[in-house]
Amino acid sequence: MSGIITRLECRSEIDYPGRPLAIHWQGCRRTVKTVLAGWRSPDGTGYRVVTVDGAVFDCCYSVAGQAWRVSEIEQSAPEKI
């Protein structure tokens, strides 16, 4: 599992971890606008999210490490027609 271990605020209703609400990334708190995808694996839970400023992140929670790892996803610019 790659990414940077960081603090992540999430909504947990039935079990932990729940849907991400905000990511603490490079010294700034970035609010999550949309969850694009969610998944479970033997290692833990993951989400692909978009923040209010348009950045896309993969957020993966490791059950064994009890920590969030976050990776910023590079988005290609749309082609001009």
Image (cartoon, rainbow, N blue to C red):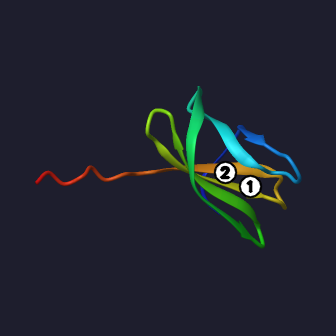
- Can you give x and y, in whole percent of width and height, for residue 48 in the image? 57, 55
Q: Position of residue 44 (x, y in %)?
A: 77, 63
> Viewed as shown, does residue 69 lie left or right of 33?
right
Position of the C terminus, as image quadrant, is bottom left
Q: SS of the residue at dot 2?
A: strand
Indicate the amino acid at tag 2: Arg
- 44 or 13, which is in the foreground? 13
Residue in the picture at 71% in, 48% down: 19
For disc 1, the marked residue is: 61
Residue occupying the point 59% across, 32% down: 31
The amino acid type of the residue labelled 1 equals: Tyr
Instruction: Indicate the position of residue 72 as horizontal and vertical percent values.
Output: 50, 48
Q: Nearer the viewer, residue 63 or 46?
A: 46
Question: Badges 2 and 1: C-beta atoms under 8 Å apart?
Answer: yes
Instruction: Locate residue 65 relative to residue 70 in the image: left or right.
Output: right
- Residue that extends furthest to the left in the rendered view of this protein: 81
- In which quadrant of the rendered view does residue 42 lie? bottom right
Give the image location of residue 30, x and y in percent.
Answer: 57, 31
| Residue under label 2 | 69
Seen in the picture, residue 37 relative to 54 is either above or below; the reply is below
Residue lying at the far right of the rendered structure? 14
Return the residue nearer the eye: 34 or 47. Answer: 34
**Mark 1 element type:** strand
Residue at figure coordinates x 46%, y 41% from the top left: 55
